[in-house]
Amino acid sequence: MSSGEFIVSLDIGTSKVRVIVAEVTRENIQIVGVGSASSKGTKKGAITDIDQAVQSIREAVTHAERMVGIEISSVFVGIAGNHVSLHPSHGVVAVSGENKEIDQEDVDRVMQAARVVALPPERAVIEVVPKQYVVDGLGDIQDPHGMVGVRLEVEATIVTGSKTIIHNVLRCVEKADLAVDGILLLPLAAGEICLSADEKNMGVVLADIGGGATSLAVFDQGDLAAAGELPIGGDFITNDIAYGLRTQTEIAEKLKRKYGVALVEEADKEVNFGVPTIGSNRERTISQEELAMIIEPRVEEIFQLIREQVESLGFPGEPAGGYVLTGGVMSTPHILGVARAQLGHAVRIISPQHIGAEDPSFTGGVGMVHYIQRRWLHRLPEYDNRSHSSKRNKNNKPSTWVKIRDFIGQFI
């Protein structure tokens, strides 16, 4: 990519479009720039107005470019939503090398074999996630590279989505003058930085609570077991405040961020502030406690709906690994207490641990960067940190990022 030694993730949320620019090597990830813009032309994870969505993408990218001082020409795009579904798959190939040592070509072929399944015409493959490899009947292998065998198999999960929704998202990215390096399942990528291996093995729910939607991912026995989305998020809290206080939505958002707390018992009734009222030129004086009385019921409802949605996905009861919560709403003070009251005590909040992107709202974009590093860079033995440009090098051999794009591109 023209951004040289950087990779770029694009998270098109319902309320915000976020761009993460990172310098990545095998051993290290450094976030060097972020960009964000109000998300327009999207609703419930789908594009409703292409021109407005393109404008939002361009604004976020421009913001990131100014921070880093480079030109961004291509991005990895995160996909989420209720249109996403998971399908088990199996692939098998004969090991091709003369010495029967499994190399990257064999792994690519078996993954391609697992991808060959009959899908309805309205569905598109987002990615294929390996669960385990099997070499000559020996299973539970996570990395078969270098092993010797005759027969290589893979048990995998195919992640599919609505072709219309995916293609409209990609169309917006292309109209914003950006190439698409690949598409990734956003909740799966977020799990790279939010969840430990033990949590995934025990069973855990990851909930990313954004402005207009809440993405859910259920992990069990080490693998992604289910994914879903709720059309509710922080914007609903803002709307409740605007309606309850009869004020403008923009003012309600500012009040929520400056004075909002999620528990009434933690609010200070001595903290007062003025609220402009629609239809009047006077301000009402409201206490933080009164504001919390509006916020707490909606926050409770969000967590109740999360629990009900997880049960509807086939996972009743409290998961052994509990709930891991992230997303912009989780910045609300004292929200963890409300979450534990509704979901159980095994609940924690996580934020990215990168300077400049510590806010929980950046979890999806940062997770994509980690996912790319862990899942794709190790596939390229010739990878080094000297050049990541997607342009052809001097001897006309494909560069690292071209190979990554070509491999992931098989699933678009």
Image (tube, rainbow, N blue to C red):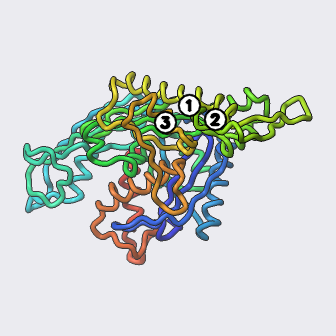
Work out whether residue 154 or residue 402 is closer to the camera in this orientation and state it. 154
Q: Amino acid at mark 2?
A: Asp
Work out whether residue 115 or residue 204 is closer to the camera in this orientation and state it. 204
> Looking at the rendering, in which quadrant would you find the C terminus?
top left
The number of callouts visible is 3
Dot 1 corresponds to which residue?
299
Left or right of residue 336, residue 136 in this image: left
Q: Is residue 18 something one can see in this rendering?
A: yes
Q: Amino acid at mark 1?
A: Val
Q: Give coordinates of residue 239: x percent, y percent.
A: 69, 31
Q: Give coordinates of residue 267: x percent, y percent.
A: 63, 37
Left or right of residue 147, residue 237 in this image: right
Dot 2 corresponds to which residue?
235
Residue at the extreme right: 281
Which residue is located at x 53 percent, y 29 percent? 302
Q: Quadrant of the rendered structure where residue 127 is?
A: top left
Q: CA distance from mark 1 to mark 2?
A: 11 Å
Q: Earlier in the sequence, mark 1 or mark 2?
A: 2
Q: Earlier in the sequence, mark 2 or mark 3?
A: 2
Q: Give coordinates of residue 155: x percent, y percent.
A: 21, 40
Which residue is located at x 80 percent, y 37 percent? 275
Front tag of 1 and 3: 3
Q: Amino acid at mark 3?
A: Gly
Secondary structure of residue under mark 3: helix
Work out whether residue 361 or residue 320 is closer to the camera in this orientation and state it. 320
Which residue is located at x 66 percent, y 39 percent? 268
Front tag of 1 and 2: 1
Q: Which mark is residue 337?
A: 3
Secondary structure of residue under mark 1: helix
Secondary structure of residue under mark 2: helix
